[in-house]
Image (cartoon, rainbow, N blue to C red):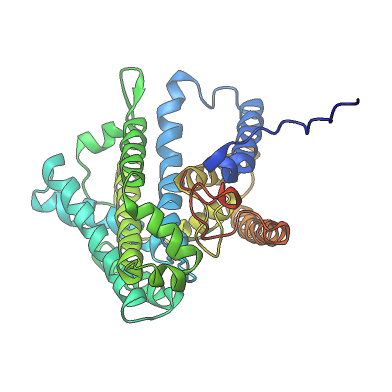
Amino acid sequence: MIGRRRAPARVSLGPYSYAAVPAAFAVVLLVVNLAFDGGFLSGGNLASTLAVSSPFVISALAQAFPLLSGGGGLDLSVGPVLGFTTVLVAGVLVPHGFVQPLTLIPTVLVFGLAVGALNGILVAYVRLPAIIATLGTYLIFSGLAAQVLPSPGGSVPLWLVDLTHSYGPIPGIALVYIAIAVCWILLSRTAYVRNLLSVGGDDRAAYTAGINVPLVRTVAFALAGMLSAVAGLLLTGTIQSGDATVGPIFTVTSLAAVALGGLSLQGGRGGLLGAALGGATYYLIQNLLTVANVSVFQLDVASGLVLILALALNGTLDHLRKKRGGGRPGTRPGDPAAEASTPG
């Protein structure tokens, strides 16, 4: 009697499957960058590389929360809030005595949470489309930043500049990433992340199941605002000044990053790991173009092309996934069809 042939074993990454392709893409780009610039991640350059890339990565993390909440939850205000934070720190808070970490950091975090919560209330309770509500705050903070600090300048505390360097062998930005990762892990142990994915996948089913959909979405936008402010704080230390013009581009990069990171643009699928990989990927593309001496104007063209290609690729993968019947947005963790929709 001939025995049955066993099906070939498949390696499953479980909840991180959605991030496999972004991770591979990031590794390839990292190798290419190292081939063009051997000192890219050397001991002396590692801290500065992490510092320069941090606004790309953390703004992508900020964009992830509204996107995961579904309902077309794109936050266009991520960039201007980030840019206004540099102005707030260097042009307002530090000149008025908010110099120490215990006063400056909480003030910046509360500012970001407040702006994000306002976006969330407009979207979840007033029921404005997210793109309209956040476009309003985009314009408000772009204008305010230019009014408060018309030209780059201001004062930056030394400890914030030091944060973009190294503490012995440990880059300061690495400590920030560790803190964010710990907070995400702790948040994932609560019901909130599960509810966030459920709302993003199917808000009507989530509402029927007893989930407070407006509150979940408001918290998602509030967290986006807070992370945008964190990215702005780190950018302030990197450029050592406030600058009203640096913010808006990070709205574009954050949108491209979440698409590159494998998050579903319809919500309910993905996590912060994918967003971070997408942000790193976008930075690596920009760095490679810079090393290749591409002009500033061509960089803008390249940014637009990366955004279009990332969104097109993301949409195509979503379509193929639905056609296969697997990885549906909104399916719950532990469901065989949903291994990619759990938080990562």
Q: Farthest residue in the front direction?
A: 1
Instruction: State how many labels appear.
Output: 0
Q: Position of residue 147 (x, y in %)?
A: 27, 69
User: Which sits in the foreground, 324 or 307?
Assistant: 324
Q: Quadrant of residue 175?
A: top left
Height in image: 288 above or below 88?
A: above
- At x 30%, y 67%, the residue is 215
**Residue 133 in view of the camera:** yes
x, y percentage for residue 273?
48, 42
The image position of residue 303, as x and y in percent, is 60, 55
Is residue 152 something that shows in the picture? no
Location of residue 28 in the rendering, given as x and y in whole percent from the top left corner: 66, 33
The quarter of the image holding the N terminus is top right
* Above-or-below relation of 237 to 307: above
The image quadrant that residue 11 belongs to is top right
Residues 278 and 10: in front is 10
Q: Nearer the viewer, residue 211 or 170?
A: 211
Is residue 207 positioned above or below 336 on the image? below
Q: Residue furthest left?
A: 97
At 63% from the left and 60% from the top, the residue drawn is: 311
Q: Residue furthest right?
A: 1
